[in-house]
Image (cartoon, grey):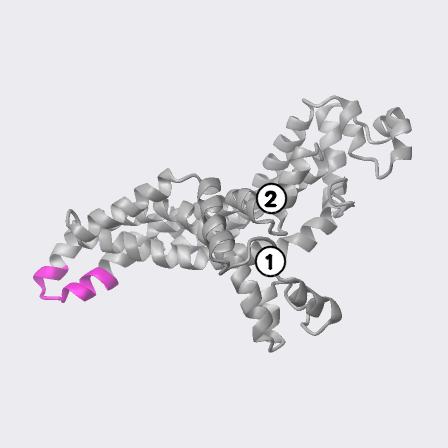
Amino acid sequence: MLNFVIRRILTLPLIMLAVTFLIVLVMQLIPPEQRAVAFTTNLQQLGRVQEIIKTNHLDGSVFEQYWLWLGQALSGNLGFSRTSGQPVTATLLARFPATLELTLFTLIPLVWVGIWLGGQAAVHRNRLPDAVIRIIAVLGYSIPSFVLGVWLLVIFYGALDWLPGTGNISNDSALLLMTGSVRHVTGLVTIDALLSGRLDVFWDGLKHLILPSFTLLVVGIPALIKGTRASMIEALHSDYIRTARAKGITERVVIHKHARRNALLPVATLISLSVSGLLQGAVLAETLYGYPGVGAWAAQAAAAGDLPGVLGFALMAATIVAVINLLTDLAYTVIDPRVRYA
């Protein structure tokens, strides 16, 4: 077990080196003069573009630029974002808690509902529940996230006025955060509100999460439903399930203890891919709902040609995906110990 964990951890830096090198390699498609603008923090520095190019070796080879960038990145310096008016690292640290909160409030129901619906579809294969669940999955695949988001805004924000349409908290709750009435512990509004005993702020933050979270849920759940269904069908038709039924074990125990446990191995991969999908979907959802996370900022940075911002977001996303894949590999060892010796 320990050797398996060590091998997987040792591959993580190699993956990050490859990802970061590709990011810097893509930057070479942009002329040095344009890349030099990313190193400026005010208009006065724009007159010293050639000096900036020489100082930062922007006219050097890709390997020279990569090692320079890697040294700066390892020290926490990812450049200055003109979009946020702050260093990229500071912007990521300030905005990431909001994206993390949105991801958590989406991922938990996504995994629970997706696995349950996929399992029910497999157990009731080719019957009414299976047909209804497959229709739900097809609808989720078919509806573009931005169209669904607009519909939700029109109905629940515009017409019914049940839910807020933008931001992650109201002005009153933001004032409580600024004055210290709600302690800043985790950076997640709902968690900090609970830790401070402010249920009103918790409910306010939760209401702001409903629409963007539901949008990401509808878009992300079809893949998990179909993957769980296929995996459960395969497990239910395996020899060990037939043996368990022949021994007189109840169908409930067969499904929940034997079939579902073995079906979770490929589903774990789908869950890790769902995290990646949520990060990608957060760019659109946060932009649509004016949610102050890293996704909305990355979209603004891309539109403004803010290269450090785009690269910082890409590096963060790549790091999260690599870590999630590592955790998935480790989860395999719990679900199926045979993987440890693969």
The amino acid marked with disc number 2 is: Pro
The quadrant of the rendering that contains the N terminus is: bottom left
Mark 1 residue type = Asn
Q: Splitting the image into 4 quarters, where does residue 21 fall? A: top right
Instruction: Estimate how packed mark 2 is, as few (under 14), some (14 to 19) or many (20 or more) residues with alpha carbons within 10 Å.
Output: few
- Magenta span dominant secondary structure: helix
- Please tell me whether mark 1 sits on a helix, a strand or a loop: loop
Which residue lies at the image location 68% right of the left edge and 72% below the top edge? 183
Whether residue 248 is in magenta: the answer is yes
Residue 193 visible here:
yes
Q: Is residue 235 visible?
A: no
Indicate which disc residue 13 carries: 2
**Residue 12: mark:** none
The span shown in magenta is: 244-257
Q: Mark 1 points at which residue?
A: 168
Mark 1–mark 2 distance (CA, rounded to whole Å)? 34 Å
Give neighbour class at mark 1: few <14, some 14-19, many 20+ (Cα, 10 Å): many
Of 291 and 51, nearer the camera is 291
